[in-house]
Amino acid sequence: MFNIGAKQMEKMMKQMGIKQEAVDADEVIIRSKDKEIVISSPNVTRIKMGGKDSFQIIGDVSERKKENFSDDDVKMIVGQTGASEEEAKKILKETNDIAETIMKLKK
C-alpha cells in the first residue's frame, strides 16, 4: 500500500490535474421518474478531473415516492367532489390518477 500523507496526496493529485473542493450543502436530492433519493446531513466533495466534475456524497439516505400531481390538480378534485384537500390528496396518492380519484370521491 501507499504510505503518503494528505499533503503529498494533494500535491500528486494537483500534478495529475485533479482538484477537490468541499461543497456546503444542507440536503442532496436525486430525482428519478418515480422517486427521490434524499441525502440529509451530507458531506459533499466535488472532484474536477479531465474537464469533468464528479461528486462524492456521504450522509443519511432515505427515499420518497414522487407525487405526480400538483396543487392545481388537488384544487380541481376538491372543486369537482366537494372533498377536503387532505382527503383528495390521500386518495390521489393511492390511485395516482385524477379521474379515478374523482370517481372514488363522488361515491
Image (spheres, grey):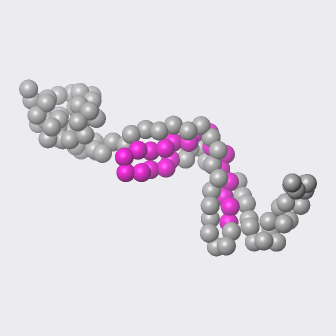
Residue at 73% x, 60% y: name it. 20
Instruction: Kindly indicate the quadrant of the structure image that contains residue 39.
Output: top right
Q: Is residue 12 left or right of residue 30?
A: right
Residue at 89% x, 61% y: name it. 8
Quick one: 85 or 100, which is closer to the camera?
Answer: 100
Q: Is residue 18 left or right of residue 10?
A: left
The percent position of residue 72, horizontal first and vertical second, equals 24, 44
Residue at 23% x, 27% y: name it. 87
Instruction: Kindly indicate the quadrant of the structure image that contains residue 22.
Output: bottom right
The answer to whether residue 52 shows anywhere in this view is: yes
Residue at 37% x, 43% y: name it. 66
The answer to whether residue 85 shows anywhere in this view is: no
Quarter placement of the N terminus: bottom right
* Above/below status of 55 relative to 106: below
The percent position of residue 16, horizontal first and vertical second, equals 78, 71
Quick one: 61 or 2, which is closer to the camera?
Answer: 2
Question: Does the magenta segment cover residue 46?
Answer: yes
The percent position of residue 70, horizontal first and vertical second, equals 28, 44
Quarter placement of the C terminus: top left
Magenta range: 29-48
Quick one: 57 or 23, which is closer to the camera?
Answer: 57
* Above/below status of 23 relative to 81: below
Instruction: Kindly indicate the quadrant of the structure image that contains residue 54.
Output: bottom right
* Above/below status of 66 relative to 88: below
Dominant secondary-structure state across the stretch colored magenta: strand
